Amino acid sequence: MTDQTTYPPSDDFAANAHVNAAKYDEMYAASINDPEGFWREQARRLDWMTFPQTIKNTSFKSDDVSIKWYEDGVLNVAANCVDRHLEKRADQTAIIFEPDDPEKPAQHITYKELSEKVNRMANVLLSQGVMRGDRVVIYLPMIPEAAYAMLACARIGAIHSIVFAGFSPDALANRINDCGAKLVITADTAPRGGRVTALKSNTDAALLHCSDKVRCLVVKHTGDQTTWIQGRDVDVKYLMEHASPECPARPMNAEDPLFILYTSGSTGKPKGVVHSTGGYLTYASLTHEVSFDYHEGDVYWCTADVGWVTGHTYIVYGPLANGATTLMFEGVPTYPDASRFWQVCEKHKVAQFYTAPTAIRALMGQGEDFVTKCDLSSLKLLGTVGEPINPEAWNWYNDVVGKGKCPIVDTWWQTETGGHMMTPLPGAHATKPGAAMKPFFGVQPVVLEPTSGEIIEETATEGVLAIKDSWPGQMRTVWGDHERFEQTYFSDYKGYYFSGDGCRRDADGDYWITGRVDDVINVSGHRMGTAEVESALVAHAKVAEAAVVGYPHDIKGQGIYCYVTLMNDVEPSDELKKELRTWVRTEIGPIASPDLIQWAPGLPKTRSGKIMRRILRKIAENDYGALGDISTLADPSVVEELIENRMNKG
Ligand code: 6R9
């Protein structure tokens, strides 16, 4: 029995795809029955200085989690993403750079040019005293230098940590300090959607809170004037011009960290997710080729930012490991107008296009003309990532953008997983609007009963989503806090990796992700801990207490709803709401702007003082009928008051 409308791959697509239905079944079975054999074979995708003998050595035991893949293998990521392609594709474009301003020319950077830039940048890093294992924070916009910097770090064995250019100086400082970075790479200013972010001055502000040993490498991107601190600030482009174009790729152990990427959880400050060298790259390369059915000569475009994991795995590491042509776009979907994405697809003859549901929803609202006036005949496949996609957006993507001819891969994965965990494979599986469908090779999803943690065996079911055994792309630890790694992912459901997501498995055995079951919200595909926004709010002198929840938002998926209790002597006002909004933007960054602030004279708490978020979520959703049992509240009358306030706001 099928669950609902399905879209099987066309015969043509299936016939030419890397993986068809029979091959998926065969490979999936092999990946589960003989993981060592399967992943030994897959490791041959990469060039190793020493090929690994030990393939898998992993344990999900909750107080002793240890994940190692290819542990005696030796390789270099930059050598795999650049050097090894030079023999065959020196003159092929590796990166197409499309600037924010459509009037400015695009850049086509060949593998040969990429090699030169990466080697020069690596020498610059060495000249600044960066050594193997040192951390380098990258705070750059979507410009080729971001990719050069990542690969330059990889080349010399330094660990990069990219901080999204939309984050505030405070957020940047916290990350520089948490990972103990020796150096930060930034740009003067960053144009985006016609507006300009002053990255260098943000960095100046951040560095006031960091060790004065931290150096600052500046990419002069726009040429805008910035402050300059002699002895600390360094002009990267100038130094690159004078550096040698040759820098040996350092032999790295497969388990050496490649990068740290900070991500939000349900409690505390963001965690530094640590990814490995060998396992991560193997997984990035395989998923990129198979999920997107990438073929030689295709132009591939992932619209994410390199500040997020999607940019790491599917703009830089996966595509370049595969010798692909990957497009980097500096701008936004709606600038100068809502046809920008489609014009870029037409201009560069994009074959695979990968974006987020929030962008699709925003563009869908602008009407079809912006799409139909562009020639999208080069498109072969569409992808989505970041949050559940609603069927209306899926159908619009399929009909209007893909003209019913491009399979849509709805890829479910996380910063922690390194690469795709569930997705239909385009030549193998039928798709369903809104379903992540099937596990990737080596991934064993289980649906657990939320309270007992028992595996639910029935096919059609709903529960929390966990993974039974390790895969090579999995994160290895939380930077500096392995116990937090074990606590966060392996303690609620013993023996499994717990994703934090809920899911439904339909009667066909296909998976649908239903969203986070913890206090993480997903705003326009950006992950945020409600606790982070709360702690920003209570840091304001006029705020006594705050509780933050997500609520359904047409474009963003979820919006940020803040209940705020003011200090005794403070009068609520619209000006104060504005002030708090600006406050949160400065504390965290514009992506954390509260959408709605409601004054809350009291918050619903249990007698032990725990805020009952379930109730706050319902009120934010305007769903007062289903508040459930409120008898355990210390003061049930606060609920009525909150509802009244909510209704008065309309
Ligand atoms: C890659 C990325 C991870 C969270 C994840 C889930 C949500 C991602 C999704 C999806 C439904 C999809 N998510 N892809 N939900 N369908 N195809 O987004 O990583 O920023 O760490 O976010 O995003 O809730 O747990 P990250």
Image (tube, rainbow, N blue to C red):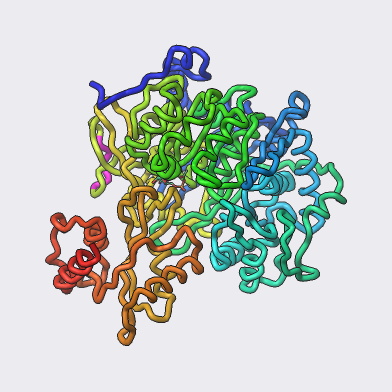
The location of residue 449, given as percent across then percent down, is 25, 43
Q: Residue furthest bottom?
A: 569
Q: Quadrant of the C terminus?
A: bottom left
Left or right placement of residue 201 versus residue 356 in this view: right
Give x and y (percent) for residue 110.
Answer: 74, 33
User: Is residue 37 something one can see in this rendering?
Assistant: no
Question: At 49% across and 68% down in the image, what residue appears?
Answer: 587
Main secondary-structure element of the magenta-colored stretch: loop
Looking at the picture, how far across and down is residue 177, in whole percent? 60, 66
- The residue lying at 62 percent from left, 37 percent from top is 327
Rendered-image quadrant of the N terminus = top left
Residue 104 located left or right of residue 112: left
- Answer with the quarter of the image where residue 130 lies: bottom right
> In this view of the protein, which residue sits in the foreground, 436 or 494?
436
Q: Which residues are magenta?
A: 452-456
Q: Is residue 93 above or below residue 520?
A: above
Q: Is residue 130 magenta?
A: no
Q: Nearer the viewer, residue 386 or 499?
A: 386
606, above or below 236, in the image: below
The residue lying toward the viewer, choosing from 495 and 329, is 329
Dividing the picture into quadrants, the one containing residue 51 is top right
Q: Is residue 18 visible?
A: yes
Residue at 58% from the left image edge and 36% from the top image edge:
344
**How many marks do you count on the picture?**
0
- Give the image location of residue 33, x and y in percent: 43, 25
Ligand 1 shows up in the quarter that is: top left
Residue at 42% in and 38% down: 412
